[in-house]
Amino acid sequence: MKILVRLPNWLGDMIMSVAFIRQLEKVYPGAEISIIVKEGLQPLLHWFPKIKHQFVFSKKRYKGLRGAYRFGKFISSKETFDLFFCLPDSFSAAVMGFATGAKSRIGYRNEFRNNLLTKSFSKRKSIHRVETYTDLLEFFSGKKTEIFSVQLENKGTINNEVVININSEASSRRLPLEKAISLINKIRAQINNEILLTGSPAEKHFVDSVFNALNNKSGIQNIAGKTGINELAEIISHAKLVLSTDSGIAHLGNAFGVYTIVLFGAGNENKTAPHNKEKCTVIRLGELSCEPCENNICKRFGTPKCLTLLDDQRITDEVLKHCDQ
Protein backbone atom coordinates (compact mmCIF):
# COMPACT_ATOMS: atom_id res chain seq x y z
CA MET A 1 0.00 0.00 0.00
CA LYS A 2 1.36 3.39 -1.04
CA ILE A 3 -0.32 6.41 0.55
CA LEU A 4 0.12 10.10 -0.26
CA VAL A 5 -1.10 12.80 2.14
CA ARG A 6 -1.50 16.47 1.27
CA LEU A 7 -0.69 18.19 4.56
CA PRO A 8 -2.37 21.47 5.61
CA ASN A 9 -0.64 24.74 4.70
CA TRP A 10 -0.59 26.41 8.12
CA LEU A 11 1.94 25.59 10.84
CA GLY A 12 -0.61 24.81 13.55
CA ASP A 13 -2.80 22.72 11.25
CA MET A 14 0.22 20.83 9.96
CA ILE A 15 1.19 19.93 13.51
CA MET A 16 -2.36 18.84 14.34
CA SER A 17 -2.24 16.47 11.35
CA VAL A 18 0.42 14.37 13.14
CA ALA A 19 -2.36 12.38 14.82
CA PHE A 20 -3.73 11.51 11.37
CA ILE A 21 -0.32 10.28 10.20
CA ARG A 22 0.08 8.13 13.30
CA GLN A 23 -3.40 6.69 12.77
CA LEU A 24 -2.55 5.84 9.15
CA GLU A 25 0.29 3.69 10.43
CA LYS A 26 -2.18 1.74 12.56
CA VAL A 27 -4.97 1.35 9.99
CA TYR A 28 -2.56 0.42 7.21
CA PRO A 29 0.37 -1.36 8.89
CA GLY A 30 3.39 -1.64 6.65
CA ALA A 31 2.12 1.00 4.22
CA GLU A 32 4.57 3.45 2.65
CA ILE A 33 3.44 6.96 3.61
CA SER A 34 4.54 9.99 1.60
CA ILE A 35 3.49 13.59 2.05
CA ILE A 36 3.08 16.87 0.22
CA VAL A 37 4.18 19.85 2.32
CA LYS A 38 4.18 23.57 1.63
CA GLU A 39 7.59 25.07 1.00
CA GLY A 40 8.96 26.59 4.20
CA LEU A 41 7.39 24.05 6.53
CA GLN A 42 9.37 21.01 5.38
CA PRO A 43 12.04 21.34 8.13
CA LEU A 44 9.38 20.22 10.63
CA LEU A 45 9.28 16.83 8.96
CA HIS A 46 12.50 16.07 10.84
CA TRP A 47 10.31 15.56 13.92
CA PHE A 48 7.40 13.82 12.14
CA PRO A 49 6.72 10.08 12.07
CA LYS A 50 8.71 8.18 9.44
CA ILE A 51 7.71 8.97 5.87
CA LYS A 52 9.03 7.74 2.51
CA HIS A 53 8.82 10.73 0.16
CA GLN A 54 8.68 14.45 0.90
CA PHE A 55 7.19 16.43 -1.97
CA VAL A 56 7.76 20.13 -1.25
CA PHE A 57 5.21 22.33 -3.01
CA SER A 58 6.27 25.86 -3.94
CA LYS A 59 3.41 28.24 -4.76
CA LYS A 60 5.92 30.59 -6.39
CA ARG A 61 7.17 27.94 -8.77
CA TYR A 62 3.81 26.23 -9.34
CA LYS A 63 1.36 29.11 -9.54
CA GLY A 64 -2.41 28.78 -9.52
CA LEU A 65 -4.48 25.78 -10.54
CA ARG A 66 -2.22 25.01 -13.49
CA GLY A 67 0.72 24.93 -11.13
CA ALA A 68 -1.09 22.60 -8.75
CA TYR A 69 -1.90 20.29 -11.65
CA ARG A 70 1.69 20.35 -12.92
CA PHE A 71 3.00 19.52 -9.46
CA GLY A 72 0.60 16.59 -9.19
CA LYS A 73 1.86 15.34 -12.56
CA PHE A 74 5.43 15.71 -11.34
CA ILE A 75 4.58 13.48 -8.37
CA SER A 76 2.96 10.91 -10.67
CA SER A 77 6.23 10.66 -12.59
CA LYS A 78 8.04 9.69 -9.40
CA GLU A 79 5.62 7.26 -7.77
CA THR A 80 2.22 5.62 -8.23
CA PHE A 81 -0.06 5.84 -5.19
CA ASP A 82 -2.99 3.73 -4.06
CA LEU A 83 -4.51 6.38 -1.78
CA PHE A 84 -4.41 10.16 -1.71
CA PHE A 85 -5.76 11.89 1.40
CA CYS A 86 -6.51 15.59 0.92
CA LEU A 87 -6.48 17.32 4.32
CA PRO A 88 -6.87 20.92 3.07
CA ASP A 89 -10.35 21.92 1.86
CA SER A 90 -9.07 23.93 -1.09
CA PHE A 91 -9.96 23.24 -4.72
CA SER A 92 -6.29 23.44 -5.74
CA ALA A 93 -5.36 20.65 -3.32
CA ALA A 94 -7.97 18.41 -4.95
CA VAL A 95 -6.65 19.35 -8.41
CA MET A 96 -3.18 18.34 -7.28
CA GLY A 97 -4.46 15.02 -5.99
CA PHE A 98 -6.35 14.35 -9.22
CA ALA A 99 -3.18 14.97 -11.23
CA THR A 100 -1.21 12.44 -9.18
CA GLY A 101 -3.41 9.70 -10.63
CA ALA A 102 -3.85 8.04 -7.23
CA LYS A 103 -6.40 5.22 -7.47
CA SER A 104 -8.49 6.52 -4.56
CA ARG A 105 -8.60 10.22 -3.69
CA ILE A 106 -10.24 11.06 -0.39
CA GLY A 107 -11.30 14.40 1.03
CA TYR A 108 -14.16 16.44 2.43
CA ARG A 109 -17.12 17.25 0.26
CA ASN A 110 -17.22 20.55 -1.60
CA GLU A 111 -19.36 21.25 -4.64
CA PHE A 112 -16.40 22.56 -6.61
CA ARG A 113 -14.13 19.56 -6.10
CA ASN A 114 -16.30 16.48 -5.68
CA ASN A 115 -15.58 15.29 -9.23
CA LEU A 116 -11.86 15.39 -8.53
CA LEU A 117 -12.19 13.06 -5.55
CA THR A 118 -13.20 9.41 -5.75
CA LYS A 119 -14.53 9.46 -2.18
CA SER A 120 -15.85 12.60 -0.50
CA PHE A 121 -17.46 12.96 2.91
CA SER A 122 -19.38 15.56 4.89
CA LYS A 123 -17.47 17.16 7.72
CA ARG A 124 -18.74 16.95 11.29
CA LYS A 125 -19.32 20.36 12.82
CA SER A 126 -18.01 21.81 16.10
CA ILE A 127 -15.25 19.27 16.65
CA HIS A 128 -11.55 19.72 17.18
CA ARG A 129 -9.39 20.03 14.07
CA VAL A 130 -7.49 16.87 15.05
CA GLU A 131 -10.74 14.91 14.98
CA THR A 132 -11.66 16.45 11.63
CA TYR A 133 -8.50 14.94 10.16
CA THR A 134 -8.84 11.52 11.80
CA ASP A 135 -12.54 11.39 10.89
CA LEU A 136 -11.56 11.40 7.23
CA LEU A 137 -9.58 8.21 7.71
CA GLU A 138 -12.36 6.58 9.70
CA PHE A 139 -15.02 7.49 7.13
CA PHE A 140 -12.97 5.98 4.30
CA SER A 141 -11.53 2.89 5.97
CA GLY A 142 -14.59 2.00 8.04
CA LYS A 143 -12.25 1.34 10.95
CA LYS A 144 -12.78 3.11 14.25
CA THR A 145 -9.94 5.52 14.93
CA GLU A 146 -8.55 6.51 18.27
CA ILE A 147 -7.19 9.99 18.78
CA PHE A 148 -3.44 9.69 19.08
CA SER A 149 -1.67 12.48 20.91
CA VAL A 150 -0.28 15.21 18.71
CA GLN A 151 3.36 14.52 19.44
CA LEU A 152 6.54 15.46 17.62
CA GLU A 153 9.71 13.52 18.32
CA ASN A 154 11.58 15.40 21.04
CA LYS A 155 14.87 13.95 22.24
CA GLY A 156 16.27 17.17 23.64
CA THR A 157 16.98 18.16 27.22
CA ILE A 158 14.90 20.86 28.90
CA ASN A 159 16.49 24.16 29.85
CA ASN A 160 15.09 27.15 31.76
CA GLU A 161 14.11 29.36 28.84
CA VAL A 162 10.59 30.74 28.56
CA VAL A 163 9.48 31.32 24.97
CA ILE A 164 6.95 34.11 24.53
CA ASN A 165 5.07 34.60 21.28
CA ILE A 166 2.81 37.67 21.07
CA ASN A 167 2.16 37.32 17.33
CA SER A 168 -0.42 36.00 14.93
CA GLU A 169 -1.12 36.67 11.28
CA ALA A 170 -4.65 37.65 12.33
CA SER A 171 -4.80 40.95 14.28
CA SER A 172 -7.71 39.57 16.31
CA ARG A 173 -5.35 36.93 17.72
CA ARG A 174 -2.27 39.14 18.19
CA LEU A 175 -1.57 40.86 21.50
CA PRO A 176 -1.96 44.63 21.08
CA LEU A 177 1.26 46.60 21.57
CA GLU A 178 0.55 48.09 25.01
CA LYS A 179 -0.87 44.82 26.28
CA ALA A 180 2.22 42.90 25.19
CA ILE A 181 4.50 45.46 26.88
CA SER A 182 2.62 45.42 30.20
CA LEU A 183 2.39 41.62 30.29
CA ILE A 184 6.08 41.00 29.56
CA ASN A 185 7.07 43.67 32.10
CA LYS A 186 5.07 41.88 34.78
CA ILE A 187 6.42 38.44 33.89
CA ARG A 188 10.04 39.72 33.82
CA ALA A 189 9.58 41.19 37.31
CA GLN A 190 8.39 37.89 38.80
CA ILE A 191 10.45 35.10 37.22
CA ASN A 192 14.18 34.45 36.94
CA ASN A 193 14.11 32.43 33.75
CA GLU A 194 15.65 33.63 30.51
CA ILE A 195 12.91 34.95 28.20
CA LEU A 196 12.99 34.59 24.41
CA LEU A 197 10.68 36.73 22.25
CA THR A 198 9.94 35.01 18.95
CA GLY A 199 8.54 36.16 15.64
CA SER A 200 8.83 35.67 11.91
CA PRO A 201 10.65 38.19 9.69
CA ALA A 202 7.26 39.78 8.94
CA GLU A 203 6.60 40.14 12.68
CA LYS A 204 10.04 41.48 13.59
CA HIS A 205 9.07 45.17 13.52
CA PHE A 206 6.18 44.59 15.93
CA VAL A 207 8.29 42.52 18.34
CA ASP A 208 11.10 45.10 18.14
CA SER A 209 8.62 47.81 19.15
CA VAL A 210 7.55 45.79 22.18
CA PHE A 211 11.11 44.89 23.17
CA ASN A 212 12.34 48.48 22.90
CA ALA A 213 9.57 49.68 25.22
CA LEU A 214 10.21 47.18 28.03
CA ASN A 215 11.19 48.51 31.47
CA ASN A 216 13.80 45.84 32.06
CA LYS A 217 15.43 43.99 29.18
CA SER A 218 17.75 41.99 31.42
CA GLY A 219 17.51 38.30 30.63
CA ILE A 220 15.31 38.90 27.59
CA GLN A 221 16.44 38.02 24.07
CA ASN A 222 14.59 39.27 21.03
CA ILE A 223 15.09 36.59 18.39
CA ALA A 224 12.25 37.70 16.11
CA GLY A 225 13.24 37.44 12.48
CA LYS A 226 16.51 35.70 13.35
CA THR A 227 15.45 32.06 13.17
CA GLY A 228 14.11 29.79 10.47
CA ILE A 229 11.47 27.20 11.29
CA ASN A 230 14.15 24.59 11.98
CA GLU A 231 16.05 26.75 14.47
CA LEU A 232 12.82 27.89 16.10
CA ALA A 233 11.64 24.32 16.54
CA GLU A 234 14.97 23.40 18.14
CA ILE A 235 14.65 26.29 20.60
CA ILE A 236 11.05 25.48 21.50
CA SER A 237 11.76 21.76 21.90
CA HIS A 238 14.22 22.60 24.70
CA ALA A 239 12.12 25.29 26.41
CA LYS A 240 10.81 25.20 29.94
CA LEU A 241 7.55 26.90 28.99
CA VAL A 242 5.81 28.44 25.99
CA LEU A 243 3.45 31.38 26.41
CA SER A 244 1.70 32.18 23.16
CA THR A 245 -1.29 33.62 21.44
CA ASP A 246 -3.47 31.23 19.43
CA SER A 247 -0.92 30.43 16.74
CA GLY A 248 1.30 27.75 15.29
CA ILE A 249 3.91 28.40 17.99
CA ALA A 250 1.45 27.23 20.65
CA HIS A 251 0.88 23.98 18.77
CA LEU A 252 4.61 23.51 18.23
CA GLY A 253 5.43 23.82 21.93
CA ASN A 254 2.57 21.57 22.97
CA ALA A 255 3.50 18.88 20.41
CA PHE A 256 7.06 18.82 21.78
CA GLY A 257 5.67 18.15 25.25
CA VAL A 258 6.55 21.63 26.54
CA TYR A 259 3.96 23.09 28.86
CA THR A 260 2.07 25.70 26.85
CA ILE A 261 -0.11 28.60 27.98
CA VAL A 262 -2.35 29.93 25.20
CA LEU A 263 -4.06 33.32 25.22
CA PHE A 264 -7.24 33.13 23.18
CA GLY A 265 -8.87 36.16 21.58
CA ALA A 266 -10.58 35.27 18.33
CA GLY A 267 -10.73 31.60 17.55
CA ASN A 268 -12.54 28.75 19.25
CA GLU A 269 -10.38 26.78 21.65
CA ASN A 270 -12.76 23.82 21.38
CA LYS A 271 -11.70 23.51 17.74
CA THR A 272 -8.11 24.70 17.56
CA ALA A 273 -6.49 24.73 21.01
CA PRO A 274 -3.33 22.60 21.37
CA HIS A 275 -4.53 19.05 21.65
CA ASN A 276 -2.47 17.67 24.56
CA LYS A 277 -4.60 19.09 27.35
CA GLU A 278 -2.41 17.74 30.16
CA LYS A 279 0.36 20.02 28.89
CA CYS A 280 -1.74 23.09 28.15
CA THR A 281 -3.65 25.89 29.84
CA VAL A 282 -6.05 28.03 27.82
CA ILE A 283 -6.76 31.52 29.11
CA ARG A 284 -9.78 33.36 27.75
CA LEU A 285 -11.56 36.47 29.02
CA GLY A 286 -15.01 34.95 28.56
CA GLU A 287 -16.88 38.14 29.46
CA LEU A 288 -17.86 39.57 26.07
CA SER A 289 -21.01 38.62 24.19
CA CYS A 290 -19.01 38.29 20.96
CA GLU A 291 -16.72 35.57 22.35
CA PRO A 292 -15.62 33.42 20.75
CA CYS A 293 -15.60 34.82 17.24
CA GLU A 294 -13.49 33.47 14.40
CA ASN A 295 -12.85 36.73 12.55
CA ASN A 296 -9.33 37.68 11.52
CA ILE A 297 -9.99 41.30 12.54
CA CYS A 298 -12.00 42.59 15.49
CA LYS A 299 -15.07 44.01 13.78
CA ARG A 300 -16.68 45.20 16.99
CA PHE A 301 -13.88 47.06 18.77
CA GLY A 302 -11.06 47.35 16.26
CA THR A 303 -8.51 46.43 18.92
CA PRO A 304 -9.58 43.06 20.38
CA LYS A 305 -10.89 43.67 23.90
CA CYS A 306 -10.94 39.94 24.53
CA LEU A 307 -7.15 40.22 24.67
CA THR A 308 -6.63 43.72 26.08
CA LEU A 309 -8.88 42.97 29.07
CA LEU A 310 -7.05 39.80 30.08
CA ASP A 311 -5.62 40.15 33.60
CA ASP A 312 -1.81 40.33 33.45
CA GLN A 313 -1.47 38.87 36.92
CA ARG A 314 -3.74 35.95 36.10
CA ILE A 315 -1.46 35.09 33.19
CA THR A 316 1.70 35.64 35.25
CA ASP A 317 0.40 33.41 38.04
CA GLU A 318 0.01 30.62 35.53
CA VAL A 319 3.55 31.24 34.26
CA LEU A 320 4.87 31.14 37.84
CA LYS A 321 3.60 27.59 38.31
CA HIS A 322 6.18 26.37 35.82
CA CYS A 323 9.11 28.76 36.26
CA ASP A 324 11.87 29.79 38.65
CA GLN A 325 10.92 32.56 41.07
Image (cartoon, helix red, strand yellow):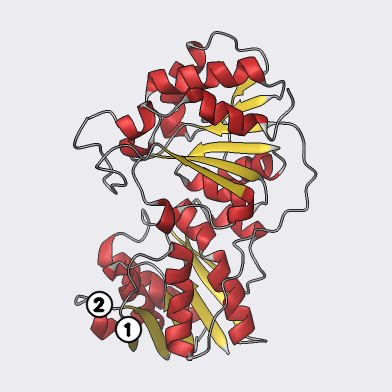
Is there a contact, CB below 8 Å, between mark 1 and mark 2? yes
Which one is in front, 76 or 22? 22
Residues at marks 1 and 2, CA–CA distance in whole angstroms: 9 Å
User: For numbered disc 1, what is the local secondary structure?
Assistant: strand
Q: Nearer the viewer, mark 1 or mark 2?
A: 1
Residue located at (48% from left, 35% from top): 200
In the displayed structure, 88 sits above or below 152; it is below
Mark 2 residue crowding within 10 angstroms, few (<14) / some (14–19) / many (20+): some
Query: For this view, does 111 lie left or right of residue 177?
Result: left
Residue located at (49% from left, 47% from top): 248
Q: Amino acid at mark 2?
A: Arg
Q: Position of residue 40 (x, y in %)?
A: 50, 50
Which one is in front, 67 or 294? 294
Q: Position of residue 135 (x, y in %)?
A: 44, 77
Residue farthest top in this picture: 215
Q: Quadrant of the N terminus?
A: bottom right
Q: Amino acid at mark 1?
A: Ser
Q: Which residue is the site of mark 1?
A: 120
Please indicate, yes or no, whether residue 238 appears anywhere in the rendered image.
Answer: yes
Q: Position of residue 162 (x, y in %)?
A: 65, 31
Q: Position of residue 132 (x, y in %)?
A: 42, 70
